Image (tube, rainbow, N blue to C red):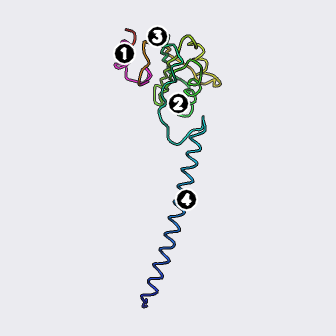
Amino acid sequence: MRFSRRSHVSLSGERLRVMLAFLSALSLANSVSAQAQANDSAKPGKPSMIQTSEPAKPASYNANSLHRLDFRVVGKSCAVCLMGIQKKVKVMPGVVKAAVMLKRPYGAVIIYDSTKQSKESLINKAKAEDKEVKVEQVTDFPIQKLPTILIPLYGIPKTASADVGSDSHK
């Protein structure tokens, strides 16, 4: 079968039209997706696909009454449950920072203003609405300054946690 030059050109012209239609559809889909993502990120409380570390809450806390509460979460091990505990505690008044480790031993840490919040209410909130969640090895002590990186004492090796604990009591 012989193709004339003219049929070959029309064939590649058809391919070109299909490719251009595909690229324009792809471009339209990307712009719609970008606009939807911008709208979602503009709504407060709406999670986005990209998680970023949040800065500490504004200086609405008393720096002289900061406390660090560390404990282990027992009874839950799925990431969704552990992050749910972190979210519940993080929104409480007086809580400056909170973190929960997603691997064993599932340590949690909360930095809070002791004039606005109590250790007992924070622990009760962490256990709230779930009978399976238990809190063990609770330590609570005052700190002089807000830590830059928040790592639970029960989420790091024992030798390093002994060093962290001794530095923070000075």
Judging depth in this view, the residue of 67 and 81 nearest the camera is 67
Report which residue position mark 1 lands on.
Answer: 162
Report which residue position mark 3 lands on.
Answer: 142
Whether residue 130 sits left or right of residue 12 in the image: it is: right
Does the magenta-highlighted stretch encompass residue 162?
yes
Judging depth in this view, the residue of 145 and 133 nearest the camera is 145
- The nearer-to-camera label among 2 and 1 is 1
Q: Which residue: 46% across, 25% down?
A: 105
Quote the CA–CA distance across marks 4 and 2: 41 Å
Evaluate if marks 4 and 2 touch, with contact meaning CB atoms under 8 Å apart. Answer: no
> Who comes first in sequence, dot 4 or dot 1?
4
Looking at this rendering, what residue extends furthest in the top direction? Answer: 170
Dot 4 falls on a residue whose secondary structure is helix
Judging depth in this view, the residue of 31 and 163 nearest the camera is 31
Q: Which residue: 59% across, 26% down?
A: 88
Quote the CA–CA distance across marks 2 and 3: 29 Å
Looking at this rendering, what residue extends furthest in the right direction? Answer: 129
- The nearer-to-camera label among 2 and 3 is 3
Report which residue position mark 2 lands on.
Answer: 77
Amino acid residing under circle 3? Pro
The disc at residue 28 is: 4
